[in-house]
Image (cartoon, rainbow, N blue to C red):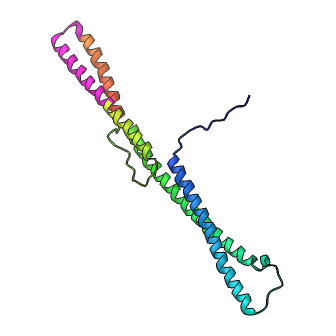
Amino acid sequence: MTKKFKRRNYFIKKSFQSRFILRFLLVSSLWSILSIALFNFLAYKKIDAILFSMRLPAKSTGSIFFKEVLYANITALVFIVLTFFLTARGIHHKIVRSLFRIRVDILRFARGDLDSRIMLSQEDEFKDFAETMNGMAADLQKRFSDIKGHLDHIMESTGKLRVSYEGDNRMHYEQIHKQLDAMEGKIREFRK
């Protein structure tokens, strides 16, 4: 019995991966083109030098152009490594900047400031995640507002109950009022 392995989808952004792969392919293609162009330039200079010297070296063609191939590939390799480094650094900064902004705003949410929103610029990554978090904060804000409204209504009703029924019900009123005060304190604690 063969076991089928299925690719698991974690938090994978296909658009981010596609852009990264496309950049990699473009830089690799650029390396090939640069290497070929540089070799052609160096080879033509070498051929001109050989033709003007009026003597053909007693070497194979491969060994005549070995230095030119080596120089062309080393130069192209240095250029490509530098390009890859700068590209990776730019991607890293975009991701870190986005994650830092998201982290700061999530900490605000955790302190109870549900009015704040995660604001990312157009070139930042994780915009879809930020929109989801903003939706969650708006939903939580609505729910807590509803709870606060119900709490205010209950407080108003218990206040009327206290006025109309003094005596034995006063003990029940005070227990209800004590619980409502505790609940309001917990809601205020969340919003700090």
Q: Where residue 28 sits: x, y (%)?
A: 61, 62
**In the rendered image, the vertical position of residue 117 relative to residue 162, given as above or below:** below
Q: Nearer the viewer, residue 98 or 124?
A: 124
Can residue 107 be seen by looking at this rendering?
Answer: no
Q: Position of residue 122 (x, y in %)?
A: 40, 53
Q: Tell which residue pokes out farthest to the left in this image.
A: 164
Quadrant holding the N terminus: top right
Query: Picture quarter containing residue 158?
Result: top left
Picture quadrant of residue 138: top left
Q: Nearer the viewer, residue 52 or 115?
A: 52
Which quadrant of the structure image shows residue 163?
top left
Left or right, residue 41 beside residue 119:
right
> Can you say whether 133 is above or below 100 in the image?
above
Q: Position of residue 107 (x, y in %)?
A: 42, 42
- Does residue 13 appear to the left or right of 43 in the view shown? left
Q: Is residue 54 magenta?
A: no
The structure residue drawn at horizontal position 23% and vertical position 9%, both measured from the top left corner, is 169
Residue 164 is a magenta residue:
yes
Give the extent of the magenta segment. 143-169
User: Residue at horizontal 63%, vertical 67%?
Assistant: 32
* 70 vs 166: above or below: below
Task: Return the residue found at the far right.
Answer: 58
Q: Nearer the viewer, residue 171 or 118?
A: 118
In the image, what residue occupies the spot 59% across and 66% down? Answer: 30
Count the marks: 0
Locate residue 48 relative to residue 148 in the image: left or right: right
How far across and down, in percent of the image, does residue 73 sit? 68, 71
> The C terminus lies in which quarter of the figure?
top left
